Amino acid sequence: MAAPPTPSSPLVASTRRFVAPRLRSLLPAAAVSMSSTSSSSISAPSNGRPVSGGAGEQRPPPSPLLPQASLEVAGARCGLLAGFDSLRRPYRAFPIVASNRHVETIFAAFARSLPAVALRRECLRTPDDGAVALDWVSGDDRALPRDAPVLILLPGLTGGSDDTYVRHMLLRARNKGWRVVVFNSRGCAGSPVTTAKFYSASFTGDLRQVVDHVLGRFPQSNVYAVGWSLGANILVRYLGEETDKCVLSGAVSLCNPFDLVIADEDFHKGFNNVYDRALAKALRNIFKKHALLFEGLEGEYNIPKAANARSVRDFDEGLTRVSFGFKSVDDYYSNSSSSDSIKNVSIPLLCIQADNDPIAPSRGIPREDIKANPNCLLIVTPQGGHLGWVAGEDAPFGCPWTDPIIMEFLEYVHNEKNSSTKGSISYEQQSVTQTSAPDVSVHVQR
């Protein structure tokens, strides 16, 4: 399965405007339905602490170690973030776009640029006779040294290598000399479906096989992972299951719903129904392409409910929870959350969340467990929406505000890993350096 033809260079210095297919049909309704009541701007009450307009809950005081007072930072080693160049500048949300969490979420999905990258697809067969698709940057087998660090990217629900936030992170890491691969789950981004089973928030088996496969191909490399939304939930669950046997060297989680019970509660409130319907439509579309695989299934499956799902919960009730052995959809959400996994994470993990995220509620963040685990760090921005973060130098059409921070964190951990192997430099004293690689500038075509 080859990626669509692209120019000869795998990293092309141009981008095109991209309209997210999962929201395209809903934009008119979204634009008309937006109201001031859904605003998530940050207000300052008399006690001086900002309050999220979305959830109405108080946020912890900002970290005194960082120049931008709006960020919430937590974790035993949060002091190391003070040395990051990307965090020396204040968090500046783009005007108007970031004034409302739904505007920012939808704007990022519709208007963010999509870097053009030539990809090479590898299909990996799973033990249950299923398949996942791995998209590598074309030509990197020859262009990069065998010991170059490897970064695995895990998109959100129904997402894949054609999503803008994934492409921007891929481009940034590749420009730093990292080998990057996008893990497209079953049915996503054209990944083949060969059995009557997709994927779920609870299932880490495919990720485990992908990690082992990557390490098998590049045994001299350190391997890292970045996950967004549902991909972040799966990633953190994997880290918790692996505990001190984890073979990854570091990871980053973004827009993680963490507590799926809380996320499900909020998913059916007000404007959030727009996202629910959009994702349900994307799930239905994937299902319909492979409907014959599900013909005649016995037991608790409710195939008509999944095929005609009007919400993610309907799809999960009809298909997902049965496929993965849960008694009910509530049982599935309760036992698939990654919040309980944080305490068992044994490698460096950076979690970045938006306080006004409509899909990954701030109140679901396991703050105390993150603080108690010396391997974990947390950054919470006052704005950002879901997969938005339209802020910083590249706003409004460029990469999310989070990308430079992710890369600095990963380089820091990578340098520490190499230094500890040589036994010369401590974690606290290690400074961030950049891997030498040809830089690629991206120009947005509008």
Image: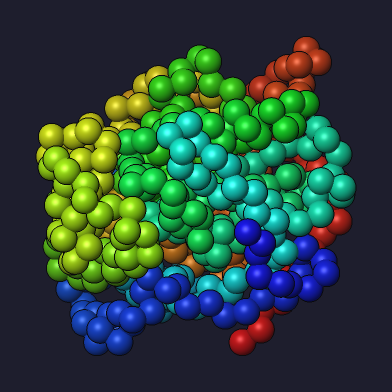
Q: Residue furthest front?
A: 296
Question: Can residue 22 be seen in this snapshot?
Answer: yes
Q: Which quadrant is home to the C terminus?
A: bottom right
In this view, the residue in front, 360 or 15, is: 15
Residue 61 lies left or right of residue 118; in this view the side is left
Question: Can residue 334 be seen in this snapshot?
Answer: no
Where does the image place residue 288, in percent across and percent down from the top left? 32, 65
Q: Tell me which residue sits at (56%, 50%) in the image.
A: 133
Q: Tell me which residue sits at (81%, 54%) in the image.
A: 139
The mark total stands at: 0
Residue 233 lies left or right of residue 330; in this view the side is right
Q: Which quadrant is home to the N terminus?
A: bottom right
In this view, the residue in front, 378 or 442, is: 442
Q: Tell me which residue sits at (21%, 82%) in the image.
A: 33
Where does the image place residue 339, in percent across and percent down from the top left? 31, 33
Where residue 72 sits, quadrant-wise, is top left
Q: Tell me which residue sits at (66%, 84%) in the image.
A: 445
In this view, the residue in front, 227 or 120, is: 120
In this view, the residue in front, 399 or 374, is: 399
Where does the image place residue 342, in percent across and percent down from the top left? 38, 27
Where does the image place residue 387, in percent across and percent down from the top left? 43, 60
Position of residue 262 relative to residue 40, above or below, is above
Residue 58 lies left or right of residue 391; in this view the side is left
Position of residue 3 relative to residue 14, above or below, is above
- Say how the picture is coloured: rainbow
